[in-house]
Image (spheres, rainbow, N blue to C red):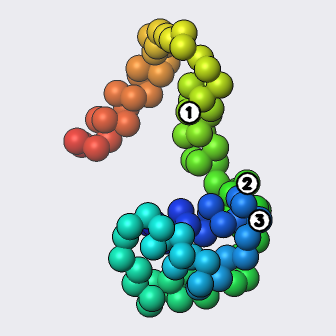
Amino acid sequence: MEYVYAALMLHKLEKEVNEANVASVVKATGAEVNEAQVKALVASLADVNIEEAIKAAPVAVAAAAPAADVAAGGDEKKEKKAEPPSEKQEEAAMEGLSSLFG
């Protein structure tokens, strides 16, 4: 995982994602570098447009949104109360459960 983070950091800093740079970033963290993993990562990213891959990852965007609010200095916590499910939603859920258990 640290190799992927290193590649993302290099991309963010507009540095070339190559074996030497990835290895340097991982070494800087104090972790041991596995040259085979570095080579595999760089080879797998050779034909990947990292910017497009980031944009196509909806999970990363959704997970990053709350962190962005906190980073923006939002000391105030805004709690959202979960709305109770509607009758139709409850019925659909029960139908799904009953189909699982026959």
Give the quadrant of the N terminus.
bottom left
Q: Nearer the viewer, mark 2 or mark 1?
A: 1
Report the residue marked by disc 2.
55
**Which secondary structure lies at badge 3?**
loop
Residue 61 sits above or below residue 25 on the image: above
Q: Is residue 79 visible?
A: yes
From where the camera sits, is residue 44 visible?
no
Residue type at mark 2: give it: Lys
Identify the residue position indicated by label 3 in the image: 14
Residue 15 vs 12, above or below: the answer is below
Q: Horizontal and vertical percent for residue 64?
A: 59, 39
Disc 2 versus disc 3: nearer the observer: 3
| The quarter of the displayed image where residue 50 is located | bottom right
Looking at marks 3 and 1 on the same chain, the residue that comes earlier in the sequence is marked by: 3
State the separation of the CA atoms marked 2 and 1.
17 Å
Q: Are marks 2 and 1 in contact (CB under 8 Å)?
A: no
Disc marking residue 32: none
Question: What residue is at 53 percent from the left and 89 percent from the top?
Answer: 39
| Residue 67, disc | 1
Q: Is residue 52 left or right of residue 99?
A: right
Q: Secondary structure at mark 1?
A: helix
Please state if 91 lies on the left or on the right of 47 as rendered: left
Q: CA distance from mark 3 to mark 1?
A: 23 Å
